[in-house]
Image: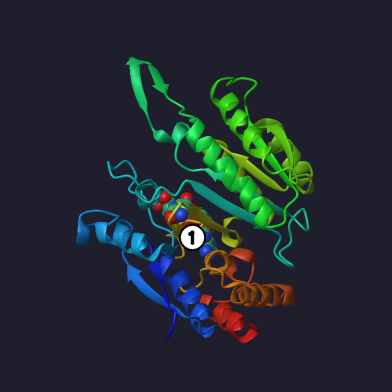
Amino acid sequence: MANTRTVTIINGDGIGPEVMGATIRVLEALKLPLEFDHRDAGTEVIAKYGTNLPHETVEAVLRSGVALKGPTGTVVGGGMPSANVGLRKRLDLYASLRPVKSVPSVKTRYEDVDLIVVRENTEGLYVGIEHIIVPGVVESLKIITEKASTRIARFAFEHARKMGRKKVSAVHKANIMKLSDGLFLDCCRKVGREFPEIQYEEVIIDNLCMQLVKDPSRFDVMVMENLYGDIISDLCAGLVGGLGVVPGANIGERTAVFEAVHGTAPDIAGKGIANPTALLMSSVMMLDWMGLTEESKRVQGALQAVYGNGKLRTGDLGGSATTREFTDAIIAAL
Ligand code: NAD
C-alpha cells in the first residue's frame, strides 16, 4: 500500500494482549495505511531476553517513531527499572499528555469534564537520586532544570494552541520550594509571553486539588513537574470514571508512545473481560498525532455511540459485556 506507515505494537503483560487485540481489530476495520510491527516488553519476556525492555524493541520504536503500548508489569523490589521508565529515558519521552474527558453516560459527579494534564516526564523527584546521610536520615533530590521546564512549558502552550484551548495553568509549590518550583514558574511565564492569545495563570498544587474536585470546569490545560503531574493525572482520571477510560501518551522530540494508563489487571487477566476503552482512546490520540484525523473521529464517534447507547458495558463499569462483545459493538458502530 502506498505511504504505509509502521506502528510499533507492544502488547505488554496481563490484560495487555487482550486490550491490544481489541484495539488492533478496530484499527484494522478502518483499513488504514498502517503496518503493525509487534515487539516485546514487560515482565513476561524477561526469561526470553534477560530484560523487560529488549534493545530491539527500543530500536524498533526509534525507527517507526510511534508506538502503541499495553500495560507492563513491574518487578517489585527487583533491581530492574520498569519498562515504562526505561522507554521514557531511552526515547527521551519528556512530555506526558493526559486528556481527561467525560464519557457519555458513564455516571460521575461531574458532566462535561474536559481537561488536559501535561506532565514533565524526565526530572523532579523521579530522577531517583536518594542517599542515606546518616542512619535514620535520607535525602532525596528534586532536580528542576531551565531546559526541561522550558521544553515542557512550550509543549503545553503549543498543544493548547493546536487544540484551540484558552488557558494554561502552571501548577507549583513555589511558596515553599522557592528555587526549584520558582525556576519552573519562571520558565512557564517566559514561554507564556510567546502565546498572547492563551490566558496564563499559576495555581498552587494543594489549592488546585481542592478546586478540581469542587469545580473542574475552572481549568483547561494544566502543566506541572513530574510528581505533581503523576498525582493530578490520576485525580483527573477519577473525575471521569477512573483509569479504565482515559488515554495517555508519552511524547518526545522524535518519537511518541501511546498507552493506556491503567495497569496489567492481574485479577482479570486471561478472562476476556477487560475494558479496551483506554487503549482504544490512546489509539485515537495516536491517529490524531499521525495526522489521521478523519479516522480518529470515526473511532471516537463509535466509542461515543456505544457508550451513549448505555446498554453495553464491561464489568469495570458495572456491565457484563466481554472484551470481544464490546469490540464487536465498536466495529459495528464505526
Ligand atoms: P491495575 O490498573 O492493573 O488494576 C487496578 C484495578 O483496575 C484492578 O481491579 C483491575 O482489574 C482494574 N482494571 C485496570 N484496567 C482495567 C481494564 N482495562 N478493564 C477492566 N478493569 C481494569 O493496577 P495495579 O493492580 O496497581 O497494577 C498491576 C500491575 O500493573 C503492576 O505490576 C503495576 O506496576 C503495573 N502498572 C503498569 C502500568 C503501565 O504499564 N502503564 C500502569 C499502572 C500499573
Which residue sits furthest front? 194
50 lies left or right of 43: left
Residue 137, horizontal then vertical, whole percent? 39, 16
Q: What colour scheme does the image use?
A: rainbow
Residue 30 seen in this snapshot: yes
Q: Quadrant of residue 295?
A: bottom right
In-image side of 51 versus 165 (left or right)? left
Q: Is residue 11 left or right of residue 44?
A: right
Q: Position of residue 217 (x, y in %)?
A: 78, 49
Q: Which amino acid does the dot numbered 1 rest on?
A: Glu
Q: Which residue is drawn at 76% across and 53% down?
A: 109
Q: Closest to the observer: 319 or 235?
A: 235
- Residue pictured at 62% horizontal, 52% vertical: 159
Q: In which quarter of the image is residue 131?
A: top left
In the picture, the quarter occupied by the N terminus is: bottom left
- Where residue 196 sits, quadrant-wise, is top right
Residue positioned most to the top: 134
User: Residue placed at 55% from the left, 20% from the top?
Assistant: 179
Question: Which secondary structure, mark 1?
Answer: strand
Residue 40 is situated, as x and y percent measured from the top left of the image, at 31, 64
Q: Name the residue under label 1.
A: 259
Locate the C terminus and report the quarter of the image it occupies. Answer: bottom right
Q: In this view, does 238 lie to the left or right of 267?
A: right
Work out whether residue 250 or residue 215 is closer to the camera in this orientation and state it: 250
Q: Is mark 1 within 8 Å of ligand 1?
A: yes
Q: How many labels does the image show?
A: 1
Relative height, residue 6 to residue 132 (above, below) = below
The x and y percentages for residue 106 are: 71, 64
